[in-house]
Amino acid sequence: MSKIRWTIQILALMVANLGLLAVLETGIPCPFFYCHGCPAAAFACPIGVFQNYAALQQFPFYALGVVGLLGLPLGRFWCGWACPFGLVQDVVSLVRGRKGRDILRLPRGAWIKFVVLFAAIVLAWAAGETLFCKVCPAGSLFAAIPQRFVSADFHFGTFFYVHLVTLAAALVLFVLVGRFWCRFLCPMGAVLGLFNPVSLLKVRVDFDKCSRCQACLSVCPARIEKLEDIENCTDCTRCGRCLESCRADAIRIAASLRR
């Protein structure tokens, strides 16, 4: 499953950059964290779109509709299988080895990303500007740095250096803590996490087969702490690592309304 997931992540990155062809630069919000400022971006970042609506003091009916249509069936599957910034974190995490144990152990802080989401929207509404975009590390990697090389009109400014600092800090944290951005700070992860309890796609544990060895929890990139939380918690990205580690074949990823 790991090879399939890596393949899909790379394909998703390619699709996200189909904007190299102007006719494919749609501006439609994508279901993962990617910067519309990227020279090749084919889609808009949902968090950027939400901020734009907030800055205009308008309700984001369109953006919420698109994200809802994509998030309701799959929840945070998009984070684990398609997000380009998630791919970056997975690549960096290879430094820690196959099991991906955290070098820096932090308590679970799933609530923090909801605070980040709330703050990004409120600040955009108050300032009339997409302030979160100016410090976003994904914007650093996918937009600010590429624009430096492809745009003759690009000028260095304060926020370019801010982007570099936030990206450098993020990369260090990715080495120390697996999927740090997804687990603690990603506002898009917060949005998609809200769909996890009601999404059609679930990671289900058959407790009749489960030996409670907790091998699944030991390899979980989201650091879910209880077996009972796997199915509906806002952290699970449906990556399948738990399924691969289960010797009892007690875990499955199922697209069904029934258990």
Image: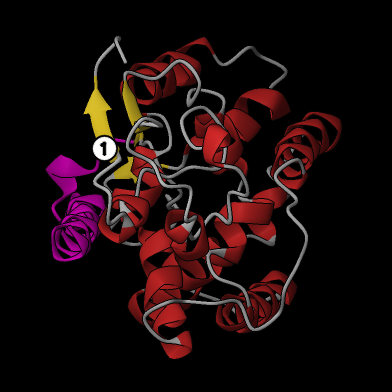
Q: How many marks?
A: 1
Determine whether the residue tagged by mark 1 lies in a helix, strand or loop. Answer: strand
Q: How is the image coloured?
A: secondary structure
Q: Which residue is mark 1?
A: 252
- In the image: residue 199, left or right of residue 116: left
Image coordinates of residue 106 in percent, x first then y, are 76, 67
Quadrant for residue 244, please give it. Answer: bottom left
Toward which corner of the image does residue 40 lie, by quadrant? Answer: bottom left
Q: Is residue 3 above or below residue 194?
A: below
Between 141 and 243, the one nearer to me in the picture: 243
Q: Nearer the viewer, residue 18 or 207?
A: 207
Q: Amino acid at mark 1?
A: Arg
Q: Can you give x and y, in whole percent of width and height, for residue 80 in the image?
A: 37, 50
Residue 230 visible within the image: yes
Query: At 34% from the left edge and 36% from the top edge, which residue is drawn?
Result: 27
Relative to 16, is 99 on the left or the right? right
Q: Quadrant of the C terminus?
A: top left
Compared to residue 192, the image places residue 56 above or below, namely: above
Q: Is residue 9 magenta?
A: yes
For the residue pair 145 and 79, the one nearer the viewer reads as 79
Magenta-tinted stretch: 1-27
Residue ID at (72%, 73%):
105
Q: Main secondary structure of the magenta part?
A: helix
Residue 258 position, x and y percent, is: 29, 10
Residue 173 picture location, percent across and down: 65, 77
